[in-house]
Every structure is written in structure tokens, then in C-alpha cells.
Image (cartoon, grey):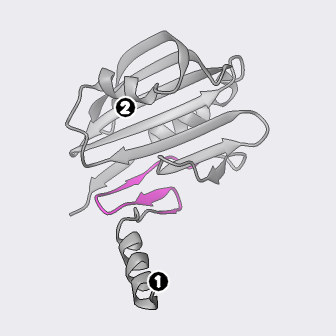
Amino acid sequence: MPRMMWVLLWAVSLAGCRRVTYEDSVLTKPAVRYRVGKLPEHWKHVWLEGNDLAFSEEGTGRALSVNATCEGHDDPPLPVLTRHLLAGFTERQEVSQQLVPLAGREALRSRYLAKMDGVPVQLELVVLKKDNCVFDFSYVAPPGLAEERLADFETLLAGFEAERRS
């Protein structure tokens, strides 16, 4: 393949990349900029495909993730957005679900017991619609180990602020 064709393919592939930066608890995307609460150092920032932010606690099976979708979501209701987060989990059992205030809006917070690839997990999920964006927050932990770090998830949520970018 001629060199110019490689350069063109490379440029086209870059144009399709999501440009996301994360620094000091602030995530910047082309359509939105948002902040989350600062987590303790035992949470390590990791790359998890399909999420803007992901953190794991080494050796415990605990993980936190945050994502913002500002295009192509067709404005579904909060329960539908929660069901989307449950894709891939089996034997889902709803433990609780309630509307909670978050960033001046109403968010849906849900707790589930489920399995991922046959492994039991506890899920704490929060979905929010704000400024034409959908924000989702997830905390996954082995059953019986979730409560110990649930306060960290609360910290992440408590620090959440978002601003739509043009």
C-alpha cells in the first residue's frame, strides 16, 4: 500500500477516536466536562473499555466506573438506562431501587445481586440525565465485600458536577 494511503488511514482512524482526558478528578470529553469526588489511594485508575473512568482495588474484585453519553441515547427513562447497565449479568436480583437527588436532578439508584460469567457480584448503580447527557455510575464488588468500600462510591457521587460543552 502506498505511503500516502497509510497516512490517510491513520488520519481517518484518529478522527474517530474519542478524545477523553482525566486529571485531578476532572474528565473532559468533547461534549461534556465533569468532576467526581476524589477517591482514596487504594483505588487505581484503570482503562475499562466502554467507560470514561474506571478504578479498581487490586486483589479485591471491587471496581468503580463512570460514563457520560451525550449523543445517540434517545432520552430513555431511568429504569431503561439501568437495565442497559445490567447487560451481560445473569441471575439478576433487584435488592433495592429508589430515586435520589444528584447534581440538582433526580437520579435512579439501584442495588442488585447478579452473576458475571458465573461469578456472584453485588452491583450499586446510579443513572442520571442532565444537560442532554446520560451519566452512569457503577460499583461492583463480591457479595459480602461491598459495604466496606461503599463510602468511597458515595464520595465519588458527592463530588459529581457536570457542565455541557459546545
Q: Residue at x 46, y 38 (%)?
A: 157
Residue 152 horizontal side relative to residue 17, left or right: right
Residue 145 horizontal side relative to residue 112, left or right: right
> Can you give x and y, in whole percent of width and height, for residue 12 in the image?
36, 73
Viewer-side label of 1, 2? 1
Front in this rendered view, residue 126 or 120: 120
Q: Earlier in the sequence, mark 1 or mark 2?
A: 1
Is 30 in the magenta? yes
Q: Residue at x 36, y 40 (%)?
A: 135
> Can you give x and y, in whole percent of width and height, for residue 158 in the image?
46, 39
The residue that label 1 is drawn on is 1
> Can you give x and y, in whole percent of width and height, for residue 96 in the image?
46, 11
Q: Indicate the quadrant where residue 117 lies.
A: top right
Crowding at dot 2, Cα within 10 Å, few <14 / some 14-19 / many 20+, comes out as many
The magenta-colored residue range is 21-39
Q: Amino acid at mark 1?
A: Met
The residue that label 2 is drawn on is 127
Q: Amino acid at mark 2?
A: Val
